[in-house]
Image (cartoon, coloured by chain):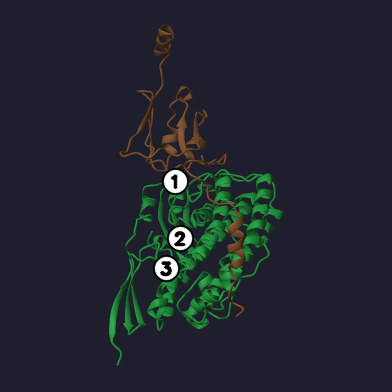
């Protein structure tokens, strides 16, 4: 029978080989540089141009120029990196870790401090 | 006198990753006829073109399928680029070719694993998927995503691969080729595997032609047709011939797919050697007006994209014909006359992707 024992070589190699899987989550996974996990913002640089909200394919981003807030629905975001590529101030960036799982759908709102608020903070300190 | 009975198969079945329902008309254990019904995972993605503008729709298009997501995105982009008369830079064409062939390797390895799983060869299944993991890692390094890549856009690619990355990939591919050669011996020569695949589920050349089969399913029946020969992306510069088999049974389909993986290694190597320097995208101005019919060769066969624009940012119509839809009539033909125990494997040999069929 020529057709038997064809898998033996692979099996033997497997026996002496170390596991190909990682011991997740005990061993932290290393992400490549380009991994798209979640969008984060440096709100102090934001000029509220609303370009990210316009380009977002799922409409997960809302920008309120009057209230100086930038809001993202992390569960509506599809991590396409469109907003990051189009941001003129480069204040948006892509984190490599994904949004943590949650029992309810939450939104993340960032508010830009006005100059008076900054002043107040300084005085406090 | 044999007794006729009807056995429902699916939509939930261990061998099916996706829902399709078949009513199998049996005579004792022999299948006389199979009546399919689909419609369990319709998502209305074509309708979404009314809500998303033509550039945003790229991200919808690549979500049609989780395996050939790159090629769905690319097929849509190429169709819109034809409508808008956009010529993408040569480097972008080569990048598309490389990512396309990586998708093909990924899809065929996934299929080989599923096939091994279907006939109960668990360790062979794991070996196939172990190899596939390397391709997924390569995708993550180059695009940032493992399943949904988001690198296509109208007018080119959003990401580039530098020389260092390409040389690393070609090294990984060399390793993979060696390991796949080892595993393919089991797939092609093992007695247990042959007993499940050989002389089962014949589809003749004439039947494949009449029933409009596509892809490896058709090529395993002896028809040498490959849409890559139509010359999209960088395929006109690449030297390759469609891979065929004259036999037309399940074993031939497995054989064709394995040889296609080796061919894809070769195509990627050619593309890495020939890739020109330059830009990866051109700016696109204006709105699409007109229509185009685009045919691309996906791992499962030929997919068709029809795009019609009306001069506004919303397209009038996008229509996708996926390879699985074209292969269903051929699959029903192969089921006729087979044993009930062979049905799962025969369904698997067309590499069904029901979710992209229904969109």
Badge 2 and badge 3 in a common chain:
yes
Instruction: Kindly identify which residue carries mark 2.
Output: B306
Label 1 residue SS = loop
Q: Position of residue B7 (x, y in %)?
A: 30, 76
- State the separation of the CA atoms marked 1 and 3: 26 Å
- N-terminal of the two: label 1 or label 3? 1
- Locate the C terminus of chain B by quadrant: bottom left
In this view, the mark in front (2 or 1): 1
Give the CA distance from mark 2 to mark 1.
17 Å
Disc number placed over residue B86 in the picture, else none: none
Query: Which residue is under mark 1?
Result: B56
Please, which residue is most extreme toward the right here? Answer: B273
Counting from the top left corner in percent of width and height, residue A60 is at 38, 38
Work out whether residue B156 can be spotted: yes
Mark 2, Cα crowd under 10 Å, few <14 / some 14-19 / many 20+, is some
Which image quarter holds the N terminus of chain B? bottom left
Q: Is residue B268 above or below residue B283?
A: below
First in sequence: mark 2 vs mark 3: 2
The subunit letter for the residue under badge 2 reads: B
Give the camera-side residue of B227 and A111.
A111
The number of discs equals 3
Which chain does brown denote in the image?
Answer: A
In front of the other: label 2 or label 3? 3
Residue where numbered disc 3 is placed: B325
User: Which of pointers 1 and 3 indicates the residue nearer the eye?
Assistant: 3
Instruction: Assign a secondary structure to mark 2.
Output: strand
Q: Which chain is green?
A: B
Give the spatial CA distance, label 2 vs label 3: 16 Å
């Amino acid at each position: 029978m020529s057709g038997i024992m064809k898998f033996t070589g692979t099996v033997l190699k497997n026996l002496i080989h170390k596991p190909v899987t990682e011991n997740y989550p005990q061993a932290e996974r290393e992400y490549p540089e380009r991994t798209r996990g979640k969008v984060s913002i440096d709100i102090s640089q934001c000029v509220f141009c609303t370009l990210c909200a316009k380009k977002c394919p799922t409409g997960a981003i809302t920008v309120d120029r009057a209230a100086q807030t930038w809001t993202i629905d992390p569960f509506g975001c599809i991590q396409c990196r469109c907003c990051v590529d189009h941001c003129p101030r480069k204040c948006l960036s892509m984190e490599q870790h994904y949004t943590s799982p949650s029992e309810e759908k939450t939104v993340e709102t960032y508010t830009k401090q006005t100059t008076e608020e900054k002043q107040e903070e300084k005085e406090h300190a | 006198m044999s007794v006729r009975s009807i056995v429902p198969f699916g939509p939930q079945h261990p061998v099916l990753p996706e829902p399709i329902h078949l009513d199998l008309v049996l005579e004792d254990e022999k299948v006389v006829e199979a009546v399919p019904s689909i419609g369990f995972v319709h998502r209305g993605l074509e309708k979404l073109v009314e809500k998303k503008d033509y550039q945003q729709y790229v991200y919808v298009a690549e979500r049609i399928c989780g395996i050939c997501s790159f090629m769905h995105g690319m097929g849509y982009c190429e169709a819109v680029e034809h409508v808008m008369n956009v010529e993408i830079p040569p480097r972008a064409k080569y990048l598309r070719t490389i990512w396309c062939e990586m998708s093909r390797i990924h899809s065929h390895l996934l299929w080989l694993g599923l096939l091994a799983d279907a006939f109960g060869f668990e360790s062979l299944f794991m070996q196939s998927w172990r190899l596939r993991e390397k391709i997924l890692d390569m995708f993550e390094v180059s695009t940032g995503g493992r399943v949904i890549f988001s690198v296509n856009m109208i007018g080119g690619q959003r990401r580039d691969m530098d020389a260092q990355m390409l040389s690393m990939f070609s090294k990984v591919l060399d390793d993979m080729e060696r390991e796949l050669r080892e595993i393919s011996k089991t797939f092609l020569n093992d007695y247990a595997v042959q007993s499940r695949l050989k002389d089962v589920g014949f589809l003749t050349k004439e039947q494949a032609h009449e029933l409009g089969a596509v892809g490896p399913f058709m090529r395993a029946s002896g028809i040498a047709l490959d849409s890559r020969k139509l010359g999209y992306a960088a395929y006109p510069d690449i030297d390759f011939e469609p891979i065929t088999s004259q036999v037309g049974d399940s074993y031939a389909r497995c054989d064709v797919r394995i040889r296609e993986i080796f061919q894809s290694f070769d195509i990627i190597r050619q593309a890495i050697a020939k890739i020109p320097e330059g830009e990866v995208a051109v700016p696109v101005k204006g709105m699409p007006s007109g229509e185009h019919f685009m045919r691309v060769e996906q791992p499962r066969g030929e997919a068709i994209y029809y795009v019609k624009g009306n001069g506004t940012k919303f397209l009038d119509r996008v229509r996708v014909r996926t390879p699985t839809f074209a292969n269903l009539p051929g699959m029903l033909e192969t089921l006729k006359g087979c044993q009930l125990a062979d049905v799962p494997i025969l369904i698997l040999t067309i590499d069904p992707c029901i979710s992209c069929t229904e969109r």
